[in-house]
Image (cartoon, grey):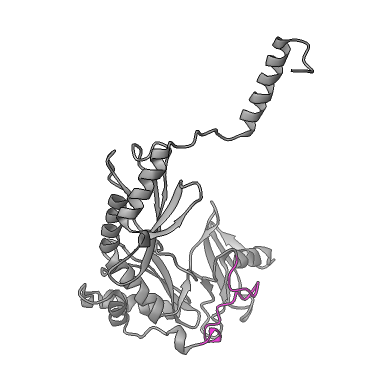
Amino acid sequence: MQHSPDLLSFMLELKMILEVALKNKQELHAPPPPQYYSGLLQELATLGWDKLAYMESSFSTLKLKAQDASGREHLITLRLKAKYPAEPPDCVVDFPVPFSVTWTPQGSLGSIHSQFVAALDSLKAFWDVMDEIDEKTWVLEPEKPTRSATARRIALGSNTSVYIEVDPRHPTMLPECSFLGADHVVKPLGIKLSKNIHLWDPGNTLLENLKDVLEMDFPARAVLEQSDFTMDCGICYAYQLDGVVPNQVCDNPQCGQPFHQICLYEWLRGLLTSRQSFNTIFGECPYCSKVRQLFLTFNRIGLGFSHEF
């Protein structure tokens, strides 16, 4: 005010400063009333402090924990709004299915936790199935599966694997299966699956049923080494490329070298001897005899490749 010629100039300058400050801030929130904090602390005391895994210093984000019937610990993240409990909090969980909270203005952390525990019970069988697969087989993908992951790529042998997609609502039913590897290896597996489908017993675990219908035991990571599965790409010499493992395999029984989809596509595209017929590229395997040809079928949009050679 000392440097302003008059009151109007001061008010205009103050208005400009406030507009700039407001523009640079995402949003101005008035702090919640004291009742918000006292009510939240009372709810936590009623629920039990042992159920609290984390709380942000502003009391706006907290994590509650619970165990399912198999002893696995799970977390639910709650983001409370300024008008809580009039408005329901946002809930984030690591579930394979959607999770929504039934809420009323009289709702509490205790009611959310109870619904969380009930949802855990409904998914127990699914997590039991996935844990058995992770423990007793060699899972190639994902390397560190989350509780929401419903798919696994399981090693069956050298350069051969099966990709399964499990229904979290019906985890003991036959999953979607896709065999990856050379035709002379995966075709017999597909035939066994079709022939023995009548042996599938929902009363058994998914892994036991897969062993029965495929007539094989799954190799376990505990008794084998990474070298037992030569899964590195024969072109880039890496196992993972942008999070993708090699899923293209030469069908020559004397070769069987795996490749990343994009690596093989770039290789075939760069060969002068390669030819293309519609959406199929024919070319020579980088490893085996030149007289042997490979073909790769791909979708022009996004370069989504099939598993065939």
The magenta-colored residue range is: 225-241
Is 94 on the left or on the right of 113, as rendered? right
Left or right of 266 in this view: 178: left
Quadrant housing the N terminus: top right
Indicate yes or no whether the magenta region holds residue 228.
yes
Question: Where does the image place residue 114, in percent across and percent down from the top left?
Answer: 27, 55
In percent of the image, x 43 and y 52: which residue is there?
62
The answer to whether 205 appears left or right of 5 in the picture is left
Helix, strand or loop: magenta stretch: loop
**Quadrant of the rendered image containing residue 204:** bottom left
Q: Nearer the viewer, residue 72 or 122?
A: 72
Looking at the image, residue 287 lies above or below residue 303 = below
Please determine whether, in this image, residue 200 is positioned above or below residue 218.
above
Residue 65 shows up from this direction: no
Q: From the viewer's perspective, is residue 23 above or below residue 255? A: above
Res. 213 visible in picture: yes
Percent position of residue 115, x then y: 28, 54
Relative image position of residue 23 (x, y in whole percent):
63, 29
Vertical placement of 91 versus 87: above or below?
below
Provide residue 217's location: percent of width, then percent of height. Answer: 36, 85
Which quadrant would residue 11 be assigned to in this image? top right
Identity of the residue drawn at 50% across and 33% down? 30
